Amino acid sequence: LILAVTASNTVAFQYVSTYNNKTAPRTKANTIVPATTLRPSTTSPFLKSYTATRQKYLQQETHYSRSSSLYASADNSSSSSIINNGEVDVDALIKYHASIVLQMGILFSLLTGLDYAVSSLLPTTATVADDSIAAVAPFWASCILFYGLSLKSRTFNPLDNTRPDLGKAVTSSMDDGQDQEPSSDDPTTTTTTGSKGFGDRVMPSWTPPGIIFPIMWVLIIGPTRAYTASLVYTSTGHFADPAILALLFHLSVGDVWNTINNTEKRFGAAVTGVVCVSLANVNAAFQFYQADQKAGMLLAATMVWFTVASALIIQTWRLNPVEGEELDKVYPVVGGGDVPTRFAWFAGESD
């Protein structure tokens, strides 16, 4: 390559010495004369081949450059089209499932450790469902354990599971709780379209006051879960029983749903999420019924609340379109929600 460039510079432009005839004494005038006017026959076959090859290469490079620009433009357009058409947020789905697996792994290890501690420290005096003798923790102790897990299961979930602001709930319940908009029949009058909920979305007009939600979870749903799980534990003699693990799975799915609905505000994906939460509760009630009929029937009664909650979530989704009249997708989409899905445990300070 060096020899070719040197030959090109040498042959293409030659330095010649000429005398200026118009001036005296004679002086040298340096002139650069193109080689083609002086020595057209001095161009070597090698140089001709090199020049032709180089020109062909430059043409191809220009073509590839233009093609790459066109391809990049088309790729960006297609990416925008995919996002606009609701591209599935695979990263969010992976994190949702991974958080459930991690949470269940931690809870299973915790309950297994408690079973080992109870069997090692307490006498085996209780008769369990299979007529065997086992060491069982006091009923009140298991109630405290399961009540705590019912209210604070999100502690074991790596996602950002910030609960709704109770202060906003109280403020919302003190207001009239409804948004007004001009009536289609008479612009001077207004019609009720929905409730303000926690102040971050439009909710149905029949939404219960915000203070009702923490009351339901703390005073009704939580104690019911604790009591029924303790009944199952007393019957089976194991904390890490499959029925109790089914309840913990229901709690784990609920924690992921809370992230989707309250933190990320993906109203469409929250519809799918609340269906999964309800189905997990049905499964837990069925598993409880197999171990203790009373426990299963009591836990199944909480489906009344989950049915109301599901209807509320679905109607909220319909009242909060993403763009214009288009409803949010019922699955997580790229760019959807207020914040991206993240593991709060591993987030840096910059996040």
Image (cartoon, rainbow, N blue to C red):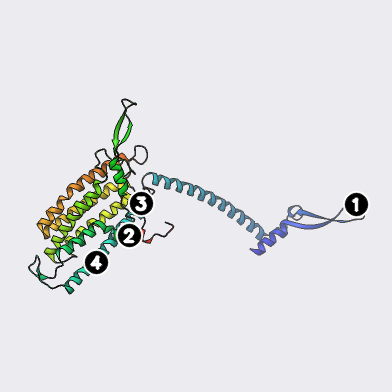
Above or below 104: residue 75: above
Nearer the observer: mark 1 or 3; the answer is 3
Residue type, numbered disc 1: Thr
Residue corresponding to mark 3: 89
Nearer the observer: mark 4 or 3; the answer is 4
Residue corresponding to mark 2: 158
Q: Dot 1: within a 10 Å radius of its alpha carbon, few (fewer than 14), some, or many (20 or more) residues? A: few
Q: Secondary structure at mark 3?
A: loop
Residue type, numbered disc 4: Leu
Alpha-carbon distance for marks 4 and 3?
A: 32 Å
Q: Dot 4: within a 10 Å radius of its alpha carbon, few (fewer than 14), some, or many (20 or more) residues? A: few
- Quadrant where the C terminus sits is bottom left
Nearer the observer: mark 1 or 4; the answer is 4
Alpha-carbon distance for marks 2 and 4?
A: 16 Å
Q: Could you tell which of marks 2 and 3 lies nearer the N-terminus? A: 3
Q: Position of residue 1 (x, y in %)?
A: 63, 63
Disc ID at residue 179 = none
In the displayed structure image, the side of residue 270 where residue 47 appears, left or right:
right
Disc ID at residue 110 = 4
In the displayed structure image, the side of residue 101 where residue 304 appears, left or right:
left
Q: Could you tell which of marks 2 and 1 lies nearer the N-terminus? A: 1
Labels 1 and 4 touching (C-beta < 8 A): no
Q: Could you tell which of marks 1 and 3 lies nearer the N-terminus? A: 1
Alpha-carbon distance for marks 2 and 1?
A: 92 Å
